[in-house]
Image (cartoon, grey):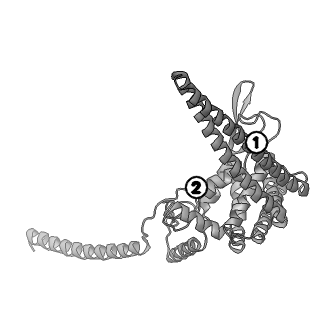
């Protein structure tokens, strides 16, 4: 057999072997692609919240994403099997149900926690030169933030005003409020404690700026102060709901306040007219007798308007004092100032005018009392 013939046979053999090997590798590659395709998940947006929450508010007022990514495990790796995919789908389903059933969102909890921590002022900080810690919150401030701006609520409505009415109707329903309380109270307290542990306050020491994280004792104090505030709020609401004299006095107080505002407006009008006539008289003395007659008449009207205004103010303040005295006598040791007590009374009065009942106010007060006790217990555990 010639040398050339042997070379040709070897080349043919190698070619056939390479063909078989290539076909085998192609089949294996196809199988690998099918395996990879079976565990690849669609991409989801990453979490926005620093606490890795899975819900944000959704409504026509607040345009935020509702669902964040839940397709990653704690270490950030992608889910790798069908069982995890199934759990993920079930979790999304539960979240969607939660969104349907609840009008308060976790964003409300986060914002409320931030609001409370911002208004917790320790001794020696810029806003609290005293030697005692204080929590500077009020129903007026809370109502402005959450009752007017609706921060953290989920509701569908064509306007802010209609959304506010719908939310208020639901929140004023004791059964709905209790269900919201049961769902959120532990979440709120845990979030408050965890965020407080990460909070840094700025102190002034010997003309130097010093930053410190809150200590366990300071967090405990925060919970006690917040519990005291909520408990006092509960007491005032309970007193209003149980004493019909308060609403009668408050109704008269608000009427007198309206009268005093009206008399003050008339008084200012007359005063301005009097000044204008005086300027005319100084500029043109040709009709002095006529101008003096007008000024005399205006002076009499001004004296009467001033008298009406002063009488109305006295009546208003007398009713105001009576309202506050009734509440303070029922609740000795109440920490609220007169302005806060009166604002709470006015808030209740608006709810009654809108068709709510005193029984509902009392039930809401009971829920606040439960919340206060829960926070006090958590403080004792720290």
* Pointer 1 or 2: first along the chain: 2
Residue drawn 52% across the image and 64% down it: 58
Estimate how packed mark 2 is, as few (under 14), some (14 to 19) or many (20 or more) residues with alpha carbons within 10 Å: some
In the image, is residue 60 above or below residue 293? below
Position of residue 326 measured from the top left corner of the image (x, y, whole percent): 87, 56
Taking 37 as reference, is 148 left or right?
right
In 3D space, how far apart are the residues under numbered discs 1 and 2 (Cα atoms)?
A: 37 Å
The image quadrant where one finds the N terminus is bottom left
* Marking on residue 149: 2
Residue drawn 70% across the image and 50% down it: 259
Residue 372 visible in this rendered orientation of the protein = no
**Residue at disc 2, secondary structure:** loop
Residue 229 visible in this rendered orientation of the protein = yes
Position of residue 73 measured from the top left corner of the image (x, y, whole percent): 55, 64
Residue identifier under label 1: 310
In the image, is residue 163 above or below residue 118? below
Residue drawn 63% across the image and 35% down it: 271
**Residue at disc 1, secondary structure:** helix
């Amino acid at each position: 057999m010639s040398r050339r013939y042997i070379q040709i046979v070897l080349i043919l053999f190698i070619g056939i072997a390479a063909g078989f090997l290539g076909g085998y590798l192609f089949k294996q590659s196809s199988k690998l692609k099918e395996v990879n395709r079976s565990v690849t998940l669609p991409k989801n947006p990453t979490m926005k919240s620093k606490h890795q929450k899975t819900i944000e508010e959704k409504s026509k007022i607040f345009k935020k994403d509702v669902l964040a990514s839940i397709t990653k495990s704690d270490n950030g790796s992608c889910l790798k099997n069908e069982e995890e995919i199934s759990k993920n789908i079930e979790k999304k389903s539960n979240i969607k149900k939660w969104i349907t059933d609840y009008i308060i969102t976790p964003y409300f909890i986060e914002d409320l926690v931030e609001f409370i921590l911002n208004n917790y002022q320790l001794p020696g900080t810029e806003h609290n030169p005293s030697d005692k810690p204080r929590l500077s919150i009020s129903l007026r401030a809370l109502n402005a933030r959450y009752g007017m701006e609706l921060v953290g609520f989920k509701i569908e409505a064509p306007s802010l005003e209609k959304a506010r009415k719908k939310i208020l109707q639901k929140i004023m329903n004791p059964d709905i409020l209790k269900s919201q309380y049961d769902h959120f109270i532990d979440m709120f307290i845990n979030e408050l404690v965890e965020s407080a542990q990460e909070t840094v306050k700025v102190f002034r020491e010997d003309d130097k700026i010093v930053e410190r994280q809150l200590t366990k004792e300071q967090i405990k104090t925060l919970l006690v102060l917040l519990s005291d505030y909520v408990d006092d709020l509960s007491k005032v609401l309970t007193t209003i709901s149980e004493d019909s004299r308060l609403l009668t006095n408050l109704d008269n107080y608000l009427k007198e306040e309206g009268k005093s505002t009206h008399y003050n407006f008339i008084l200012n009008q007359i005063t301005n007219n009097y000044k204008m006539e005086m300027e005319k008289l100084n500029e043109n003395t040709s009709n002095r007798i006529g101008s003096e007659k007008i000024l005399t008449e205006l002076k009499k009207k001004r004296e009467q308007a001033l008298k009406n205004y002063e009488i109305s103010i006295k009546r208003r303040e007398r009713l105001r004092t009576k309202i506050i005295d009734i509440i303070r006598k029922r609740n000795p040791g109440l920490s609220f100032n007169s302005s806060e007590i009166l604002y709470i009374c006015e808030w209740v009065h608006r709810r009654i005018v809108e068709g709510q009942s005193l029984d509902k106010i009392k039930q809401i007060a009971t829920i606040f009392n439960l919340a206060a006790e829960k926070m006090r217990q958590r403080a004792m555990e720290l």
